[in-house]
Amino acid sequence: MKSYKSTHIVIFLTIFIDLLGFGIIIPLLPFFMDDVMHLNESTIGIIVALFSLMQFIFTPVWGSLSDIYGRKPILIMSLAGNVISYFLMALVFSGFILSFWLLIISRILAGIFSANLSAAQSVISDITTKENRSRGMGYIGAAFSLGFVFGPALGGVLSEHFGFGIPIFLASFFSLSALILCITALEETLPVELREQSKKDFKGVTIINLKSVHEVLTNRKEGFFIILFFFITFSFANIHATFVLFTKRPAGFHLTQEQSGLILSFLGIIGALVQFFLIKFFKEKLGEEKSLILGNFITTLGLIFIPVFNSIFLLLIVIFILAFGNGLNIPMALGLISKNTEKDRQGSVLGINQALGSLARVLGPIWGTFLYEKFGYQYPFISGGVFMFLVTLFSFKILLKK
């Protein structure tokens, strides 16, 4: 197969720079809505989930269009949309236009145009063999993790010293930089003949094609792994909004946004190290299926023990466990989905998988903040751990039986 080392580097840098901007927002959004806009937990969860709701609706469209028009145009469109959405959000966070509805609009636009994940996954599937697919997906996962390494820390530190607006303007600038990199350096990876074939088979754009989703989920090869990925994502998404609320309030650790951002960066560091250096090791020693089971079990332990301890040192140990498990099971699941999908269906299937992952990230924060508000701060973490334990048992039974 043709060498695509430069494409690996460009797609890695594009995703990293874009996710650096996204990572900046993670610790700030719950802080800002809690401290400045004084919203309750359930409302915070809904606003956090809006981004993923738009991804759920529109990502299958971008995935299918990437099969028809190529990966590069879709990546360019998504990055341009992110520039606009972050700029609008910065106007709210800086206080220039302190509007609840403009915040809603910016989150909706960010979700609509965040199509770069499925397109990036399709780029990797275009340039890798089935045997190297998990490692290739690991590069994308590592770019995400590195975005979460530097983004939350940068957002937390800047907001602590310069206010909420400056880091969001910086996020818009990062997406602009990623856009320029994508335009100037990324080569199209989908062959013309496959694009032409996809155009012939194309029957119109649908927001969400339930028939296609049903066909994918009932496919014995790819459907099982997509269902697993959905529940893995949902379990982790339980804590998307509640973790920062938990650490900032006296019931937790009473941390500042800078301190919360540094803890989230630590989570990203461990995930990146696992995806950079250990994916190949686990794949060779255990195989992808057993590595997926192990990652699920480790993630279960990490989620359940987050609210148990009142020591920062012990919390960091639990965060290490959670990041290790999540850094292992996500690329293994993505690799197995792609490995079991025909080449001419990669964009569509990965787009459906990403859409269902977005649905999980819609339901997770809403469910987690509801539990937080109605029953207490421990329950989102316990709930996520219970779901992951069931996922572990299910994957253990099915995969080892296979």
Image (cartoon, rainbow, N blue to C red):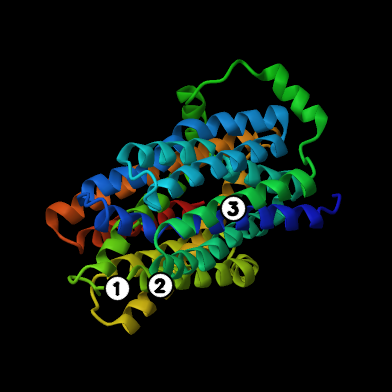
Residue 231 drawn at (x, y percent): 39, 49
First along the sequence among labels 1 and 3: 3
Based on the displayed image, in which of its 4 quarters is residue 257 positioned?
A: bottom left
Give the structural element (helix, strand or loop) at label 1: loop
C-alpha gap between disc 1 and disc 2: 10 Å
- State how many labels appear: 3
Please tell me which residue lies in front, 276 or 256.
256
| Mark toward the viewer: 3 or 2 | 3
Residue at the image point whose x is 56% and y is 70% from the top? 274
| The label number, if any, that marks residue 263 in the structure image | 2
Asked if labels 2 and 3 touch by Cβ distance under 8 angstroms, the answer is no
**Label placed on residue 173:** 3
Q: Earlier in the sequence, mark 3 or mark 2?
A: 3
Q: Secondary structure at mark 2?
A: helix
The residue sitting at the left extreme is: 375
Taking the image as drawn, is residue 377 in sight? yes
Compared with 383, 47 (above or below) is above
The image position of residue 133, as x and y in percent, is: 67, 53
Where is residue 256 shown, x and y percent of the image?
Answer: 32, 71
User: Is label 1 or label 2 in front?
Assistant: 1
Looking at the picture, which amino acid does disc 1 mark?
Leu
State the residue at coordinates (81%, 28%).
193
Residue indicated by mark 1: 255
1 vs 3, front mark: 3
Q: Nearer the viewer, residue 58 or 276?
A: 58
Q: Nearer the viewer, residue 115 or 104?
A: 104
